[in-house]
Amino acid sequence: MKIRLFSANHRTAPVELRERLALPDDALPRTLATLRAVPGVGEAVLLSTCNRVELCVVEDGACVEDLEAVLGRAAGLSASQLSPHLQRLEDEAAVRHVFRVASSLDSMVLGEPQINGQVKEAYRRATDEGSVGPLLHKLFHKAFAVAKRVRTETAVGASAVSVASAAVDLAGRIFDELPQRPVLLLGAGEMGELALKGFRSRGCRDLWIANRTLERAAELAAGYDAAVLPWSRRVEFLTTADVVLCSTGATEPVLTRDDVARARRARRGRPLFLIDISVPRNLDPAIRKLDPVYLFDVDDLGRAIDEGHESRRAEAERAERIVDGEVTSFGRVLAQVHTAPLLRAINLKVREAVDTEIERTLGNLGGAIGDLPTGDQQRVRKQIESMGAALAKRLLHDPIAEVRRLGEAGDVDALGAAAKVLGVEATLLSVRQGDARLEPKEAAVGDDG
């Protein structure tokens, strides 16, 4: 049995691939069902956001290529397109990754709060679809507890920038006189609101919002003294706006190269700064070829954000130490979970042996106790059965204690040897202290596991 994780994120995959991997909500149940149909897969959780895809499974002999193929087919990607950009982790490394993702230590924006909610939602949906079993229940509940510790015991999330506020900072670098520049926001969702708040805090007053739903744009604009622009006029307004920030749920570009090219002629050389924080991207990448037009996407932002992480590095190191300790703790939990079949097999084997010998002894004593009254016969049987149970308990005490100790220490080789000596079989998964992996081993000598 193995915990296996596949990840494509801002560090491993470019935005053009991530935008294809971002599954629509209605595709998630179908994809989880397909994953569960892969032979050997027992449990699965799939997280799909605009910046990452994380697949965590518990499997016993499943084909890795089959699992990757499910992700590829869901996104319309071939194995050659997807494989080079997948991070593959097993067991302890997979556990650490889940803890880090839930704690926002693996995010583009260190400490951002949204990812924890996204992980919880992915777990909830997988649970609703029946693809979460005992091991992933333990793993994800532990991940949420780790995230809470990181949030309360460190300052990683203190003053954490969002992607939207990083975009505002980048606009400030492009234009020294940012407060005097007209700003157009395309989209009135959460990121759009954060960006609007950021522009307002920098002194920008010429703020405009365009959204497909006019009522939502008006609602957002009212809170920040901004103006509302009909969605149909967004291209026309490019002749006026100097800064355009786009964050919508569209799957196709809402501004094309031709749109910007027409506006550029009317701008008479005035620079235009566009930033697209949407995934899939909402601004045509070909806009980059125009001059003087500056287009940035989320990957460009990621590089800019890295420069601002230094102030939180010390807190991040504290958070990483918390994660390391919790990974070790969870490893002991896993060891106990996966040595349980071995312990059950040992107990069952001994109980069966004791029961067999009790019946043989009573049979041999048949003539000697057959003439005794029924009550005395029952007392003899009870005494022999009690003696057998007491002997079994005494004989098993030290072996069982040692199996538990070996499980907690992660000594899988010794556990396998113990299973062979005792003549039982179990699938073992345990953590080697100081090792980078969980090591699965088979101790095969019987069929009680």
Image (tube, rainbow, N blue to C red):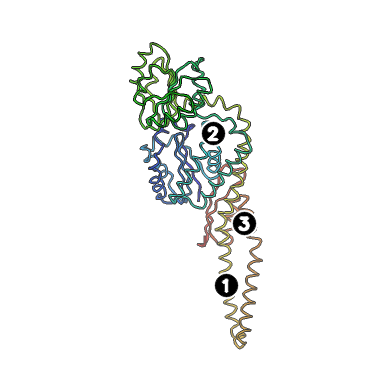
Q: Which residue is tagged 2?
A: 112
Point out residue 328 in the picture as x, y percentages from the top left corner: 61, 45
Q: Quadrant of residue 239?
A: top left
Q: Which residue is tagged 1?
A: 355
Q: Secondary structure at mark 3?
A: helix
Q: Upstream in the sequence, badge 3 or badge 2?
A: 2
Label 1, residues with CA under 10 Å away: few <14, some 14-19, many ≥20: some
Q: Quadrant of residue 253?
A: top left
In whole angstroms, how far apart are the C-alphas of marks 3 and 1?
23 Å
Label 3, residues with CA under 10 Å away: few <14, some 14-19, many ≥20: many
On screen, 98 above or below 381?
above
| Residue contact between numbered discs 3 and 1, judged by CB atoms under 8 Å | no
Total number of numbered discs in the rendering: 3
- Answer with left or right where residue 204 lies relative to residue 66: right
On screen, 378 above or below 248?
below
Point out residue 2 in the picture as x, y percentages from the top left corner: 50, 48
In whole angstroms, how far apart are the C-alphas of marks 3 and 2?
42 Å
Q: Upstream in the sequence, badge 3 or badge 1?
A: 1
Name the amino acid, label 2.
Answer: Glu
Q: Upstream in the sequence, badge 2 or badge 1?
A: 2
In whole angstroms, how far apart are the C-alphas of marks 2 and 1?
60 Å
Name the amino acid, label 3.
Answer: Val
Q: Which residue is tagged 3?
A: 403
Point out residue 361 in the picture as x, y percentages from the top left corner: 60, 78
Q: Secondary structure at mark 2?
A: loop
Name the amino acid, label 1.
Answer: Asp
Image depth: mark 2 or mark 1 in front: 2
Point out residue 28 in the picture as x, y percentages from the top left corner: 40, 43
